[in-house]
Amino acid sequence: MIRTLATLAAISFSTVAFADGHATGDVEAGEKAFKKCKSCHMIADGDNVIMKGGKSGPNLYGIIGTQAGSQEGFKYKKSIVAAGEAGLIWDEATLAEYVADPSKFLKAYLDDSKARSGMSFKLKKGGEDVAAYLKSVGPVMEEEATEEATSSDS
């Protein structure tokens, strides 16, 4: 009985912690871990290059809060486009899960055993950190900082 109550309490707390779709990553660790990603991906806001990298994967600036497979100018595989059309919006938690095993994530998300990702690399550790880093350098973070400054001025 005590074990059951303890388990229920733990689930309740974890549900609240993750209900808003945020992972609990370390931004500094994510910046270091992103070095594994930059062989294919860059982070750039127009001419402002935040992290120089490859171009075989999409630019990851502003990925948090966007629909999967929707960046203009990049040719995605059909499974990631289908996931976006089915409602997949990247947040820290879903991005962290995706980078751990992209095809496995898409198979589960789309309930399609044939789903495949164009990203073959699997980031087995540090996905939460990379997601937190990408959020920290993107417009979502900039908007939140502006909103906080505006609300504290009121």
Image (cartoon, helix red, strand yellow):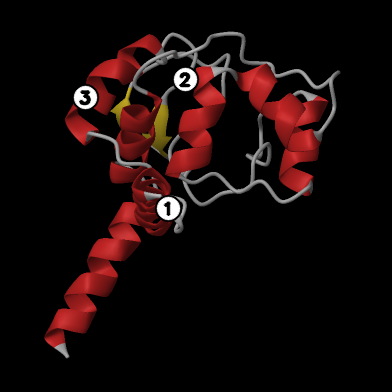
Q: Residues within 10 Å of mark 2 (few under 14, many from 20)?
A: many
Of the numbered discs 3 and 2, the one sitting upstream in the chain is 3
Secondary element type, mark 2: loop
Left or right relative to 3: residue 75:
right
Residue drawn at x 78%, y 47% is 85
Answer few, some or many: residues within 10 Å of disc 1's Cα (few below 14, many 20 plus, some between 14 and 19).
few
Which residue is located at x 42 percent, y 52 percent? Answer: 8
- Residue, disc 1: 8
Q: Disc 2 designates what residue?
A: 41
Task: Give the CA separation, mark 3 to mark 2.
Answer: 17 Å
State the quadrant of the C terminus. Answer: bottom left
Residue 28 is left or right of residue 79, and the answer is left
Residue type marked 2: His
- The relative height of residue 14 versus residue 93 in the rendered view (above or below) is below
**Distance between the alpha carbons at the discs numbered 1 and 2:** 41 Å
Task: Identify the residue at the far front of this view.
Answer: 1
Q: Earlier in the sequence, mark 1 or mark 2?
A: 1
Residue 123 visible? The answer is: yes
The x and y percentages for residue 3 are 37, 43
Camera-side mark, 3 or 2: 3
Instruction: Indicate the amino acid at tag 3.
Output: Ala
Q: Quadrant of residue 112?
A: top right
Residue 4 or 71: which is nearer the viewer?
A: 4
Q: Residue furthest left?
A: 153
Q: Secondary structure under badge 3?
A: helix
What is the distance, in whole Å, between disc 1 and disc 3 at their CAs? 32 Å
The amino acid type of the residue labelled 1 equals: Leu
29 up-or-down from 142: above or below: above
**Mark linked to residue 29:** 3
User: Which residue is nearer to you in this view: 89 or 41?
Assistant: 89
